[in-house]
Image (cartoon, grey):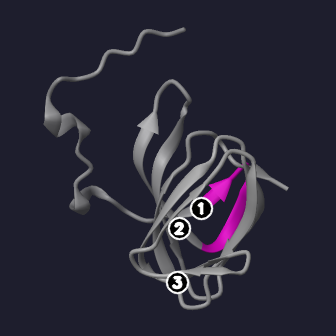
Amino acid sequence: MENITWSTNIEDHIVRNNNRQWQPLIEKGIHYEGVYVISLHYDQRKERSTTILLKFEAGAIYPYHNHPAGEEIFVLNGEAILEEATLGEGDYLYTPPGFKHSVRSQTGCTLLLNIPEEVEIL
């Protein structure tokens, strides 16, 4: 395994607000209309982002999927619907490994997510 050396300068590990830009969410060539992402932490060992912001426009949907290693969601604003549960601003959800669900928003929302392993679209 590759030996990764981390910087000891704290500034190298800060994602500044003015440096972030929302990007359309495109995974494996599939564009999820109305869903946008900002990567906050890119894990070099896993070669993927593990901490992200997701923004859903009103009516946007992320399809039914599995989380092999679980997931953490914190709602920054708006409302997100996972299965039949509605999460509002300030709500937190931990989904255990192997948990399956879809995500949609009728009003639009912004979510902070920690996703240790890549999701599997079902």
Q: Which one is earlier in the sequence, the residue at label 1 or at label 2?
A: 1
Residue 80 within the magenta-colored segment of the rendering:
no
Judged by depth in the image, the label closer to the viewer, 3 or 2, is 3
Q: Main secondary structure of the magenta part?
A: strand
* Magenta span: 25-34
Residue 64, position in %: x, y?
A: 79, 64
- Residue at 44% across, 39% down: 42
Q: Which residue is mark 1?
A: 25
Residue at the image position 23 percent from the left and 45 percent from the top: 14
Kind of residue indicated by mark 2: Tyr
- Closer to the N terminus: mark 3 or mark 2? 2
Eyeballing the image, is 31 above or below 68?
below
List the residue tagged with mark 3: 79
Viewer-nearest residue: 25 or 97: 97
Q: Is residue 14 left or right of residue 100?
A: left
Please give the residue where the numbered disc 2 appears in the rendered image: 36
Q: Residue 13 at what x, y percent from top left?
A: 25, 38
Tell me how far mark 1 sits from mark 2, CA to CA.
5 Å
Secondary structure at numbered mark 3: loop
Count of residue discs = 3
Q: Position of residue 110 (x, y in %)?
A: 45, 73
Residue 30 lies in the magenta-colored region? yes
State whether residue 79 is above or below residue 97.
below
Circle 2 packing at 10 Å, graded few (<14), some (14-19), many (20+), is some
Q: Are marks 1 and 2 in contact (CB under 8 Å)?
A: yes
Q: Amino acid at mark 3?
A: Glu
Check whether the beta carbons of the residues at disc 3 and disc 2 lie within 8 A of each other. Answer: no
The outermost residue toward the right is 122
Compute the Cα span from label 3 to label 1. 19 Å
Name the residue rendered at 46%, 33% in the picture. 43
| Apparent side of residue 57 relative to residue 74 in the rendered image (left or right) | right
Q: Residues within 10 Å of mark 1 (few under 14, many from 20)?
A: some
